[in-house]
Image: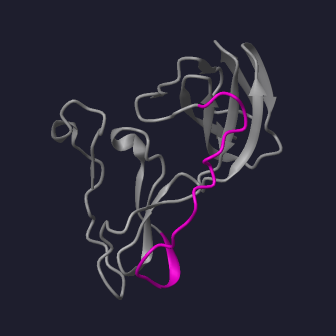
Amino acid sequence: MRQFDLQSSSIPASEIIVATYDGFEDASSKTTFIYPKLAPDNKIYLTSHTTYFHTIDFPDLPGLSCHVSQHAFQVPAVCTYLPNTPNYQLGVSSDTCIFLNASNVVPSTNCKLLMNPSNGILNLRLEVNGHLLLYDLFGHKVFENDLSEGANEIDLSFIAKGLYVAEFLTLRNLERLEIILQ
């Protein structure tokens, strides 16, 4: 599977291989990379006339950080296509419109995680005000909160132990962090 930077001055030169078919087959067919579809959870799902789906968990991130999962999950029957789904995220809830693409998803510079793994208390030091979203590995939002510049202590002890993806959203950037709760 190849990824291209469509904003590059040389699109062919921006090609990156993010996954190679691993040869996996189910009873009906090979599980190749066809029929991609962006879903409301902002992941890309792919199927190929099989009972298995592949996922691209972070399609806006460049290279292997987009995290392609081959045969990520199985459904009960052969799926030959993906349904059309409306884009529920077309509206904005404020006067500010933020356009996110691979060029403004940046390594975390405005948001510093002070202790990782965490025992359930998350300590963040922020350079700017922003909005924190926390997702489990299934893409379900488990926590959301506005945060202020400076030190922030967040009690996440009510959330199950495990690996989570935190997104810190500012007016200009989206930063992603992996958080381990022990």
Q: Quadrant of residue 64?
A: top left
Tell which of 132 and 136 is nearer to you. 132
Tell which of 27 and 40 is nearer to you. 40
Q: Judge whether residue 12 is colored magenta.
A: no
Horizontally, residue 149 falls left or right of residue 1, namely right
Q: Judge whether residue 74 is colored magenta.
A: yes
Q: Residue at x 50, y 34 (%)?
A: 100
The quarter of the rendered structure image containing the N terminus is: bottom left
In the rendered image, the residue lying farthest to the front is 95
Magenta residues (range): 73-97
> Above or below — where is 37 with respect to 133?
below
Q: Residue at x 60, y 56 (%)?
A: 138
> Above or below — where is 82 with respect to 150?
below
Residue 120 shows in this picture: no
The quarter of the rendered structure image containing the C terminus is: top right
Q: Residue 106, how many percent across, how many down? A: 47, 26
* Colouring chosen for the image of the structure: one colour
Residue 146 shows in this picture: yes
Horizontally, residue 129 falls left or right of residue 111, namely right
Q: Residue at x 56, y 32 (%)?
A: 177
Q: Residue 77, how many percent across, how many down? A: 49, 87
Horizontally, residue 51 falls left or right of residue 41, namely left
Q: Residue 162, how many percent across, how many down? A: 65, 47
- The kind of secondary structure the magenta stretch mainly shows is loop
> Above or below — where is 75 with respect to 174?
below
Q: Residue at x 69, y 48 (%)?
A: 141
> Number of labelled discs?
0
Q: Residue 20, how many percent across, how many down? A: 25, 58
